Image: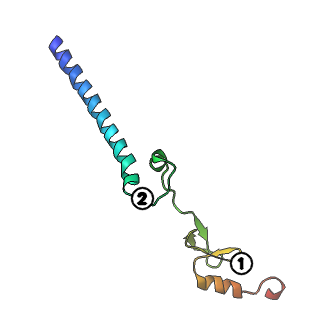
Amino acid sequence: MRQLLLLIFVFFASQWLFKKLKRAQAAAGAQAGPQGAGATRASHGPAASRSAPQLPDPLVRCAECGVHTPKSEAIVAAGHRFCCTDHAQRYAAHPTGRDAR
């Protein structure tokens, strides 16, 4: 009975040690990987690059047609956002204010 308990203890201790070593190797590889390879992405330390997920680009609505476009791809003209240059030009050609009557 004592041998069985000792065997179970050794098994769990070896599993714990294996996981601990695996985590240490992964942390060492993550720290040496981006900095050693000359990565161009700026970060505030190795922990910041692992813990901060990339957020998707917010969508903005085209003032002409209403289609949602990623903010980075939208065209800004006259304080409005558009999905393409044609819509920005078409919107600029619309009569506004008193001229619209």
Q: Nearer the viewer, residue 32 or 58?
A: 32
Dot in front, 2 or 1: 2
Circle 2: is it few (<14), some (14-19), or many (20+) Cα within 10 Å?
few
Relative to 61, is 46 above or below?
above
Query: What x and y, as percent, mark residue 65?
Result: 61, 78
Q: Earlier in the sequence, mark 2 or mark 1?
A: 2
Q: Nearer the viewer, residue 6 or 69?
A: 6
Which residue ends up furthest to the top in the rendered image? 2
Q: Mark 1 highlights which residue?
A: 78
* Residue 16 in which image quadrant: top left
Q: Mark 2 highlights which residue?
A: 39
Q: Is residue 1 visible?
A: no
Q: Is residue 62 left or right of residue 39?
A: right
Counting every numbered tag in the picture gives 2
Q: Nearer the viewer, residue 28 or 48?
A: 28
Query: What x and y, as percent, mark residue 52?
Result: 49, 49
Image quadrant occupied by the C terminus: bottom right
